[in-house]
């Protein structure tokens, strides 16, 4: 009974959130991040430090990408951020594994909620599957229909091997000079999150930016490279 009541309250909270989003006007990067970290948006607040995410948001705002792919969506905050800051006619594609080890995916009833983040003339497509599978990769290519990705955000499997697989495979669909973001580049002591190992390799061969409050914080951190 308690589980049912809790789920009901969460769903009702999302309905209230959608009304808030429906009343929003155009937002810049600062306004978008302020909203995401406000009480109103607590159901989709990203697992990230506000200051770090703001720096990434400013980069997306400058790019105004038309094609965005996000590997790992979970709470939905970075998906919302992408929609607010992308081109007004952007295609935004999420790849997320239900029951995944890092983030756990999202339930079916959130699908229409996440798709509603799209602004007028934008399109959000949700691929619910393993980013490591050939089937998922082919679904993405069908949706892209020959177009190249402007901005890829790697936020899924946080193991070294998993993140490396996503980087090496999906970067082949990113346009030259496009941007690729990495979540959780700080060392996570006592965790299986080893994105930092991949990041330290990748940044040696690319123009890069690091958005980190404190390298001893033991969580989060964002890296961004230019594809070459």
Image (cartoon, rainbow, N blue to C red):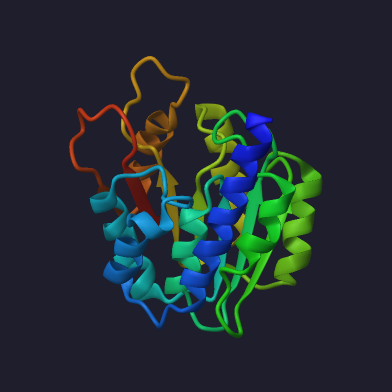
Q: Quadrant of the N terminus?
A: top right
Task: Judge by depth and name the residue closer to the eye, 74 or 171.
Answer: 74
Residue that sits furthest to the right in the current view: 135
Q: What percent of the width, then of the height, locates residue 47?
A: 40, 42
Image quarter hosting the C terminus = bottom left
Residue depicted at x 59% and y 43%? 166
Instruction: Compare residues 66 and 13 and report the one nearer the observer.
Output: 13
The percent position of residue 104, horizontal first and vertical second, equals: 61, 34
Q: Is residue 35 left or right of residue 109?
A: left
122 vs 186: above or below = below
Tell me where residue 161 appears, x and y as whole percent.
Answer: 56, 28
Instruction: Give the quadrant of residue 179.
Output: bottom left
Q: Residue at x 28, y 51 (%)?
A: 50
**As drawn, which residue projects farthest toward the top?**
190
Q: Which residue lies at the image location 64% right of the left edge and 46% below the top edge?
A: 8
Residue 228 visible in the snapshot? no
Q: Which of 64 and 204 is in front in this view?
A: 64
Residue 196's image quarter?
Answer: top left
User: Is residue 42 something one can see in this rendering?
Assistant: yes
Q: In this view, does 202 lie above or below 37?
A: above
List x then y, in percent, for residue 82.
Answer: 47, 65
Name which residue lies at 23% across and 52% down: 51
């Amino acid at each position: 009974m308690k589980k049912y009541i809790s789920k009901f309250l969460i769903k009702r909270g999302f309905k209230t959130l959608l009304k808030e989003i429906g009343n929003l006007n155009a937002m810049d990067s600062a306004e978008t991040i302020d909203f995401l970290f406000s009480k109103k948006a607590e159901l989709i607040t990203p697992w990230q430090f506000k200051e770090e995410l703001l720096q990434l948001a400013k980069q997306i705002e400058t790019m105004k990408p038309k094609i965005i792919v996000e590997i790992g969506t979970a709470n939905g905050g970075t998906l919302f951020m992408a929609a607010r800051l992308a081109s007004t006619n952007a295609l935004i594609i999420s790849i997320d594994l239900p029951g995944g080890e890092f983030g756990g995916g999202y339930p079916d009833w959130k699908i229409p909620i996440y798709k509603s983040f799209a602004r007028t003339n934008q399109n959000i497509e949700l691929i619910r599957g393993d980013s490591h599978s050939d089937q998922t990769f082919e679904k993405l290519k069908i949706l892209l229909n020959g177009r190249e990705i402007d901005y890829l955000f790697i936020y899924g499997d946080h193991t070294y091997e998993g993140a490396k697989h996503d980087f090496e495979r999906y970067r082949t669909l990113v346009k030259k000079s496009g941007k690729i973001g990495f979540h959780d580049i700080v060392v996570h002591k006592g965790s299986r999150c080893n994105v930092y190992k991949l990041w330290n390799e990748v940044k040696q061969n690319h123009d890069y930016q690091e958005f980190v409050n404190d390298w001893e914080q033991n969580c989060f951190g964002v890296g961004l490279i230019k594809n070459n």
